[in-house]
Image: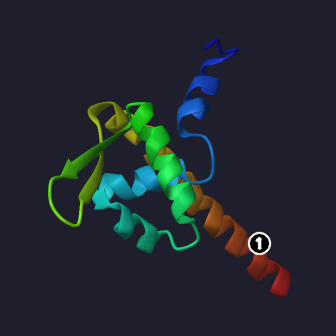
């Protein structure tokens, strides 16, 4: 695929509402699908499965299947996925700053 600017390639892999959230949870520890669903209660099961599949296809997430009944599947970041850590850390830091800024603005409106 041809991109006009490099950020398009980044957004092609991590764009959307849920992919970055999933990756941030996987930075903390590997997770089962049910664990991800529990800590992301507003995502539908269909969307979670779709996003995990896309991240796996892009080489960012690893899916390990254990041969047992019931089936056990664990998701983790690949080495390539870990290369996104600085981007994810920067997004989290900016988000924290944004939350504080919005709270300050709201406090000033109440006064």
Q: Is residue 111 left or right of residue 27?
A: right
Residue 45 seen in render? yes
Question: Which residue appears at 40% of the width and 38% of the height?
Answer: 56
Question: Which residue appears at 51% of the width and 48% of the height?
Answer: 51
Q: Is residue 50 left or right of residue 66?
A: right
Find residue 46 and report its horizontal and vertical position in percent. 55, 58
Q: Is residue 77 left or right of residue 24?
A: left
| Quadrant of the frame with the N terminus | top right
Residue 30 seen in render? no
Find residue 94 and report its horizontal and vertical position in percent. 57, 52
Neighbours of disc 1 within 10 Å: few (<14), some (14-19), many (20+) = few
Q: Is residue 57 left or right of residue 14?
A: left
Query: What colouring does the structure picture have?
Result: rainbow
Find residue 6 and report its horizontal and vertical position in percent. 60, 19
Please state which of residues 90 and 48 is positioned toward the viewer in this rendering: 48
Q: Quadrant of residue 2?
A: top right
Find residue 5 and report its horizontal and vertical position in percent. 66, 17
- Extreme top residue here? 2
Q: Is residue 47 above or below residue 35?
A: above
Q: Quadrant of residue 86?
A: top left
Please state which of residues 60 and 82 is positioned toward the viewer in this rendering: 60
Question: Which residue appears at 37% of the width and 61% of the height?
Answer: 33
- Extreme front residue here? 69
Please state which of residues 49 and 103 is positioned toward the viewer in this rendering: 49
Q: Quadrant of residue 63?
A: top left
Question: Which residue appears at 75% of the width and 81% of the height?
Answer: 107
Q: Is residue 6 above or below residue 101?
A: above
| Quadrant of the frame with the C terminus | bottom right
Q: Secondary structure at mark 1?
A: helix
Q: Report the residue marked by disc 1.
A: 105
């Amino acid at each position: 695929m041809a991109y006009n600017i490099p950020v398009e390639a980044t957004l092609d892999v991590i764009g959307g509402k849920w992919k970055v959230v999933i990756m941030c949870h996987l930075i903390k520890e590997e997770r089962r699908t049910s664990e991800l669903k529990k800590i992301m209660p507003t995502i539908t099961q269909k969307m979670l499965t779709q996003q995990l599949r896309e991240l796996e296809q892009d080489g960012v997430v690893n899916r390990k299947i254990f041969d047992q009944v019931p089936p056990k599947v664990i998701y983790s970041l690949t080495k390539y996925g870990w290369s996104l850590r600085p981007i994810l850390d920067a997004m989290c830091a900016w988000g924290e700053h944004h939350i504080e800024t919005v709270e300050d603005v709201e406090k000033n409106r109440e006064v």
